[in-house]
Amino acid sequence: MKNTFIVSALLTLISLSAMAQGNEPHRPQFHFSPKAHWMNDPNGMVYHNGTYHLFFQYYPDSTVWGPMHWGHATSKDMIRWQEQPIALYPDSLGWIFSGSAVVDVNNTSGFGKNGQVPLVAIFTHHNDKLEKAKSDRFQYQSLAYSLDEGKTWTKYAGNPVLPNPGITDFRDPKVRWFEPAKKWILTLATKDRITFYSSPNLKNWTRESEFGRELGAHGGVWECPDLFPLMHNGKQAWVLLVSINPGGPNGGSATQYFVGDFDGKTFTPYSTKTKWMDFGTDNYAGVTFANTGNRTILMGWMSNWQYANVVPTSPWRSANTVPRELGLREVGKELYLTSTPISELDKLTSKTTKLNNVPVKGTVDLTSKTGKAELIKLVLSTPSPNDFSIVLANEQGNELVIGYEKSSNSYYIDRSRAGKTGFEKGFGKRHIAPRIATDHNLSLTLLVDVASVELFADGGLTVMTDIFFPNQPLANLYVKSATGVSMSALYTPLRKAAK
């Protein structure tokens, strides 16, 4: 029909009780957040003997960044997390910055005893005293190991295992086993590029190559790299993630990626095009779990260095994104990374209500049909995309707007009127992301959890993550389209994830 936006959609709306969090109105309900104090980068994520381990940058004495520890949480399904005692504390070599953990199945490190398989963490020691003394060697890489399923950790007596050659930003080691050469590969952020090292035993490292001095975005320091293989059309490709701060596409920190080949020594990209894993402002330092078999699963820090220290939450600061399964998809002649929410989220669903062919012209209030909603999962498709928006609102006039704009062929999230914004001058903005897919069929998946929104468009080709801080729950739902919408929906309440 002329001038009519025909939409075929699956809409899952999940209601949470009105702020059961009491005096913690922005506490997420199905994302991990620490019980109290400061958190940033996820570290050492590993799956071992039926348990997912999440370690994270943690400062137990304040809600702002400070001397870093490794916090620790565990889960059986990546949805329900149990916070554990702090895993790694600062010591005479420095604070415990970001890093990774592996299951040393073959005991290459020699840390295993009596047949026990060691978990080995490799992390950056950050020596604050050397930094203050203007040394350029204040960061170096060290090891710790666990023989009791990650409950307790012993730091290696030979630390550091990778001394600093004279690079001020020399950090965030991500390690994986490279089977063809029977060696460990360490991917390290080294100021404005990535340097690869190899080792037979996690203790003795050899420099192999470097990548990126003249490629990618360079608006800030490179951080938190990750290198992993993904299959596409029966062939293996390698993906290199590089977080950058600042220099993101919508301001502040963000994560770019490259797709190419890796031969155990050198990473060779297929393309020089700069690509972003997430166009929102609140998915940073994301890395993948080790030891998850055929699945490649990532979690990121759901904040931004532009305002992370001042967001209006208490007694904690920061949460993680939902875990996301990664893949590759070809568009034109380019390979793009895709991110989609893990299927384990379906464990929280219960009753389903169908809404068929809901007509929309101008603004339609769906709240009476769906009930009050604080979490929304929306899977929407249309063969002829035109402008539309989804509005989450409350009686105080707060509005979070998510939509698609045909003229620019882009998605957007507008949090300028979504609640508290005055804590940082650049927070209350409209963020945009290009639609990467070229087919006419537009699809959208949307997740909202109290104070965060995660948008996965076109099978995860375009992703946006933004946090926001409403004055009261955004429990009303509206759909807007100037040209008209015919929408079908499926309403499913979601249970709060138990902690």
Image: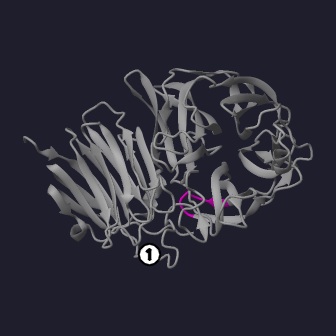
**Residue at (52% x, 51% y) in the render:** 323
Q: Is residue 171 above or below residue 62?
A: above
| Spot occupied by residue 220 in the image (x, y as percentages of width and height) | 60, 37
**Residue at (39% x, 40% y) in the render:** 433
Instruction: Quadrant for residue 375, please give it.
Output: bottom left
Q: Is residue 125 visible?
A: yes
Q: Quadrant of the C terminus?
A: bottom right
Q: Is residue 413 above or below residue 422?
A: above
Q: Amino acid at mark 1?
A: Met
| Spot occupied by residue 167 in the image (x, y as percentages of width and height) | 77, 33
**Residue at (68% x, 55% y) in the render:** 55
The residue wearing badge 1 is 19
Circle 1: element type: loop
Q: Is residue 50 visible?
A: no
User: Which stretch appears magenta?
Assistant: 73-80
Q: Does the magenta segment cover residue 365?
A: no
Left or right side of 303 for 481: left
Q: Residue furthest right?
A: 157
Q: Quadrant of the N terminus?
A: top left
Left or right side of 437 for 109: right
| Spot occupied by residue 221 in the image (x, y as percentages of width and height) | 64, 37
Q: Residue furthest bottom?
A: 22
**Residue at (43% x, 46% y) in the render:** 464
Q: Is residue 179 above or below residue 343?
A: above
Camera-side residue of 89 and 304 = 304
| Spot occupied by residue 274 in the image (x, y as percentages of width and height) | 49, 29
Camera-side residue of 10 and 19 = 19
Left or right side of 320 for 170: right
Left or right side of 351 for 362: left
